[in-house]
Structure formats: C-alpha cells, structure tokens
Image (tube, rainbow, N blue to C red):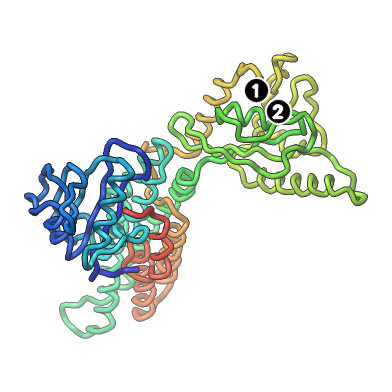
Amino acid sequence: MADSGSTIFAPATAVGKAGVAVIRISGPQAGAAVQLLCGQIPRARMATRADLRDPATGERLDDGLVLWFPGPKSFTGEDVAELQVHGARAVVADLLAVLAALPGLRLAKPGEFARRAFDAGKLDLAQVEALADLIAAETRAQARQALRQLGGALGAAVEGLRAQILRLRAQAEAEIDFPDEGDVPGGLVAAMAPAFAALDAELADLIGQAARGERLRNGYTVALLGPPNAGKSSLLNRLARREAAIVSSMAGTTRDAIEVHLDLGGWPVTLIDTAGLRALASADDGDPQLAIEREGIRRTQLLAKAADLRVLVLDATAPVIDDAFSAYAAEALVVHNKIDLAPAGRGALGVSATTGSGLAALETLLAQKAAAALSEEDGLPSLVTRARHREALEDVRAALLQARAQTAAELVAEDLRRAADALGRIVGRTGVEDVLDLLFAEFCIGK
C-alpha cells in the first residue's frame, strides 16, 4: 500500500451535515495544491483564513481555515495541509473534485495517512494499533487504554527489554569472538543468570496484563441464559434502551445470539441474548422448527462457556431451575424477571423488564463485575492489548528460557537473537509485513 511518491487527500471527518469538515492533504504536491486553492501557502502551524477557489475557473468554493505543516514535522513526515471548511456536503464534494483534478493528487486509501506516519518512523506499530483502538473506543476505559499505548508506553517497555537482550547478546558474542582477549573476561554467559531472571519477571508481568487488556479492548461479555419466555429479550432491550431483540410470547422466538454493546460506568460490556434453554426430545421427528431450536440451544451452550459472566434469567412467577440449565446455576448471576407479577425469589436480584424496577441495581452490579475483571491493581490500563502482542511476548519468554538452559555461547546468542526479533515484531521492527495491510485496512479513509 505504501506509495510515498504520490500526494494523497481525503476527508478526515465523517460524511454528513456538520458545522465543520476537515480535508487532509499529504505528499510532495501538498504545497502546490494549497497555492492553487488559496493563492498562497500560509505560515507553518498557524490557522489562516482564506478563500478557497477552483483554480480552473476561479469560482469561490468556500471561506475556511488552512493549516500548513511542512515535513518532516508533521503527522506523516511529509508536507501536510489541512483544510477546515464548512461541513455542507456540497462544499466538501466540490473541494474533493477540485483536488482530484490537480496533477499528482489522488484520494487516499483507508489508513494511508497512518501508514505513511509508520513508514516515516512517526509511530511504531503498537502506536498505530492504539490509534485504531482510540478511533473505535466506545467507553472511557477503552479510550484511556488506547491513549496510554498511543503515547508510546508499550513501545518504551518493548525497547527497554530489547536493549537488555541486545546487551546480553553482545556479551555472548564477545565470548565467542574474543575468548583470548585480555579485556574480555571469561564466563560471561554463565554470569547471565540474574539478568535472565529479571527479564523473565518483566515478561511474566506484561503477559499477565494481556488477558485484561484484550478483554477491555473487546468488551466484557455477559450472556443472558434461561428458559424460554423468561424475558431475556425484553431485559436486553431495556438495558440497551432500544428494540434490539424481537419479543414474543412464543417459545423459541430467539434462535440466534443477539449482541448489544453497552457503556456501564465507563466499562465496555457486550450483552448477548441467547436462545432459551429447555429439554428437547432426542429426535426431531422431521419438525424443522425443533431442529432450528436445537441448533440455537447448541450455540447458546457454546456462548455460555465463552462468556465472562453468565446471567441466569428466571421467570419470577415460576422460578424453576431444570436440567437444561442447572449446570450454569451455581456460577451464574441469578436474576428473577417479572417481579411486577410476582415477588423476586429469595437470594436473587429481582427486576421487571416491563416497569424497569431493579434495572439500575442490575446495571450497577454488571458495571462492578466488569470493573473487577478489566481494571488493573495499579489503576493503570494494560500495555498489552492484542493477541499479537501476547503471542510475541510468549515467544520472547520461550526463547529466553531456552537461552538460559544453554551452555554454549553460540546457542545462547542465537536464542537471544530470536528473542530480540520477537520483541521487534510488536513495534514493527521485524517480520510484520503480513500484519500491515490488514491493520491499515481497518482505518477509515482520511486517517
């Protein structure tokens, strides 16, 4: 995707009516484009009001602000211009058409601005991922975690570890290459044990953060389980504050899982409505409806196993736990719905999806459970947020453990090289070409 010879442009704000729209231009022809549109290139890093005109006709297109960021001190490392114009669709469309007609300019591909920033060394790969996560953040906790990583916290930790490993590798190679030199003491490899132990402790701490970091990025999953007609779909709709699931008195209405994403106390919670659990006959007798319901129950069971929290929703008028879902009762949060029709069961949380009674208490409890699962003891967000990070750190740790067990300096040096390369994959130093196109394709055009 990288194409540093061309000049790219794209809207950096969403399509639709808005007070202001932003159009970015990056590349060697950015200055020429601004000169043609505005008649001059404004002072660097100073918002300048200007008439924007079609250079072919002289027609005035808009009255806006122009910002000029000469490279290399810009987001992409190239010459960058930013046009802040009125957000009318017509204004934006006209400006994009004019830019497309200028020589050497083309519309940017998704993520191409961020890709150029990465290629210029403005961002490491972990920071690029953090930028994508920040754009996609739906809760305060997700944004906070992404901001910490965007600030380079993971990259700094990785570079610190990598520097230690490279020092150890230099010692091992010195013992290989200069065993008879007077200024190279013997037994360098044998003396590495304390350094290996310290590195292992740091890696164990980072890997230990991974589960929380990945879960925070993806959301804390809560599966609503229970018998048919217990009101799971109604409860989901109430918590989502919209009609996300079809509600019917007919048993088996919910056949497939329905997900809604909630922000509870600043924590991301994914609520999953599942098919009602009930015992079915071993044979379907050719009934396609029963066959579909059986598949829905099978999927519910898989979701129940994978969920971070299982909420067992029972009908308060008939709070019976039968064999179909008794396996989940002991470890699940039990909620009795329909307390407007009958009192809640003893020891269970009572709610009414109809009247809203008890829902505030349920939301608070879910937020507390999400916070307990996703927050760190030191109050700081996790550094490790993706499976790719965790897997690379596990490779580093395995290589170091193998190096620690070696006796030959040559083998120690090779294992240390593997460890350093695995760390380099996290920030984009080595072996990430297969990751790049997939990552940058996740971005919107203009970022």
Q: State the mark number for residue 11.
A: none
Disc 2 crowd rating (10 Å Cα; few below 14, some 14-19, many 20+) is many
257, above or below 247, in the image: below
Label for residue 353?
1
Is residue 338 placed above or below 274 in the rendered structure? above
Residue 300 higher or lower than 313, as above or below: below
Query: In front here: 266 or 423?
Result: 266
- Estimate the x, y position of residue 204 in percent, counting from the top left: 42, 54
Where residue 406 appears, as percent x and y from the top left, is 41, 75
Please indicate whether residue 368 sits to the left or right of residue 64 in the image: right
What is the C-alpha distance between the residues marked 2 and 1?
Answer: 7 Å
Instruction: Report the amino acid beneath label 2.
Output: Gly
Instruction: Name the residue tied to disc 2.
Output: 231
Are discs 2 and 1 less than 8 Å apart at CB? yes
Where's residue 320, x and y in %? 80, 27
Q: Give the residue drawn at x 84%, y 45%.
A: 290
Res. 156 image quadrant: bottom left
Kindly identify the residue that appears in the image at 46 percent across and 43 percent down. Answer: 216
- In the picture, measured across the screen, residue 105 lies left or right of residue 205, that is left
